[in-house]
Image (spheres, coloured by chain):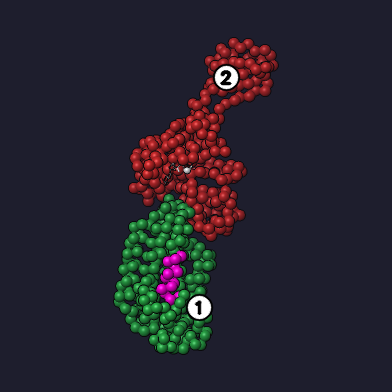
Amino acid sequence: MPVIEVTNLHKRYGGTVAVQDVSFDVAAGEIFGVLGPNGAGKTTTVECVAGLRVPDGGEVSVLGLDPRRDAARLRQLVGVQLQESQLPDRLRVAEALEMYASFYRDPADPARLIDELGLGEKRNTPYQKLSGGQKQRLSIALALVGNPKIAILDELTTGLDPQARRDTWGLIERVRERRVTILLVTHFMEEAERLCDRLAVIDKGRVVALDSPSGLVSAVAPEQRIRFRPSAPVDDRLLTDLPQVTAVTRSGSQVVVTGTGDVLHAVTSVLARNQIIAADLRLEQATLDDAFVELTGHRPAE
Amino acid sequence: MRAFGQILKIETRLYLRDLAAPLITIALPLLLLAVFGLIPAMRASNPDFGDRSFIQYFTPSLLVITLAMTAVNVLPTVLATYRERGVLRRLATTPASPAALLAAQLIISLATILISAVLLIVVGRLAFDVPLPRHPLGFALALALGTAALLALGLLVAAVAPTNKAAQAIAVPLFMLVLFFGGVYVPRFLLPDFLVRIGSYTPPGVQALLDAWTADAPQPLHLAIMAVIAVLAGTVAAKLFRWE
Ligand SMILES: Nc1ncnc2c1ncn2[C@@H]1O[C@H](COP(=O)(O)OP(=O)(O)OP(=O)(O)O)[C@@H](O)[C@H]1O
Ligand SMILES: [Mg+2]
């Protein structure tokens, strides 16, 4: 049963079409990523889901409810982190969380959340004195303080250093264990690969791909390449006979096998059966970065 | 209700932490009252002021400082800043409404004005022979309507200004005009007659405050104009106000 259903979503601003015909479903407990270059329409899409923007066309349903009509009920159930939103300069970390906690029927413990997000030492620090990454973590904490069923996180880790980014991923994984469904906008392939069960790649307001991270990679670049140095001469036919192998070439003393599916397993087994040891074995595979470039014609961020 | 209580509590703290705002709004009028009040000549009655003392004549203008500062300076800039920085929008994603924040700001404004008015009346009475308002009901009415008119103008500024900078650009000249016509920069008896008359009809209506404080009931026309301004500006502000 999907908890978020977006069907043929359209949204324009004056003459600019920001989102045209976006559809996707998010299942309960899933981490669903929205990936795409700047201006692709990611924020517009998730803010329509959050009920902050009114679609010009199409249907959005969240937990079976309408984000605009049933806004009051959904606000108890959906936590939102906006891409661009700040807090008053003099508001302190603990105050912000306690205030937001008071809005919800069954909030999380603010003090624990502060510790979980590594803001324990900053609990009495005013917002204006926080670093960019600390502000970001506070913003994530505010999205989670209501114990939501769904968390919508726009640009989860933009502005965080690599360590803080990893800590945040750990936190999101712990949140997932509580069966919270997460709709995540991201620019980082590594983040998408690590966290997301499925991804929608959006470009110029359209969904250009929708799959698991590994599914996206193999759909765009199904070929894998294996390089190794055999301990004894190998007959090419031994390898080309394997159904997974598409080509075998040699470069110097190296054998280069190209193939699809579980080609690695097939090649290593046949070598083992023939008592050949594959030294310096390397598997070259397209990454999500490659898939992203292929799908959108853009380099991903960083 | 618990959410509103929290918002009010936190907004009040933020207001007090800003120090400059409460100092100018509440402490400055009191300080000026003390400075003028300590000069004996300012306490002597003078036919120029209709047999009032200068200090009696000037105290309503001191209250205008509080009113102007609160309603057309602090309120619109806080609200415009909150909107510009996405504070209101973020609040709109939670079960608490941004309207709660607006309400909290209005309560803080009203409380500030009330505290300042009470302090000016009490300190003026105890230390500087300023009588208690002669016409308490008229005074309360003049203060309430003047406050309403000015707050409505402040909300109108907050409604039309997209950013904090824009809010300042409208609010600062408006603030100075209110102070000028309220007789704060130049005591009104030194102003030409027509300016004094204009000042009677511009918010917060210093003439009505002065009349009720030191003479008799304020003129109904003065009060009616404040009510009309409050309703008009308030309606337009409500129509134009956006959370984002
Ligand atoms: N409030 C708005 N008014 C007018 N145009 C807008 C508005 N918000 C977004 N747009 C336009 O709509 C398009 C999609 O914007 P959106 O913010 O959804 O992109 P995004 O994928 O989130 O980009 P980014 O990665 O930079 O955050 C852009 O061309 C943008 O300029
Ligand atoms: Mg965006």
- Examine the rendered structure and indicate whether residue A74 appears above or below residue A127: above
Q: How many labels sit on residues?
A: 2
Three-letter amino acid code of the residue under disc 2 = Thr
Mark 1 residue element: helix
Q: Quadrant of the N terminus of chain A?
A: top left
Residue, disc 1: B32
In which quadrant of the rendered image does the C terminus of chain A lie? top right
Give residue A202's quadrant in the image. top left
Of all chains in the rendering, the one displayed in red is A
Callouts 2 and 1 close, C-beta under 8 Å:
no
Amino acid type assigned to the residue bearing label 1 in the image: Leu
Q: Is residue B173 magenta?
A: yes
Residue A219 shows in this picture: yes
Chain B palette colour: green
- What chain letter is assigned to the residue under label 1? B
Other residues around mark 1 within 10 Å, as few (<14) / some (14–19) / many (≥20)? some
Query: Residue at position x 44%, y 79% from top?
Result: B187
Q: Which residues are magenta?
A: B172-184
Q: Is residue A161 part of the magenta span, yes or no?
A: no
- Foreground of the two, A47 or A149: A47
Q: Is residue A104 visible?
A: no
Between the residue at mark 2 and the residue at mark 1, the CA separation in whole angstroms equals 87 Å
Q: Where does label 2 land, which residue?
A: A258
The part of the image, by quadrant, that contains residue A234 is: top right
Label 2: which secondary element: strand
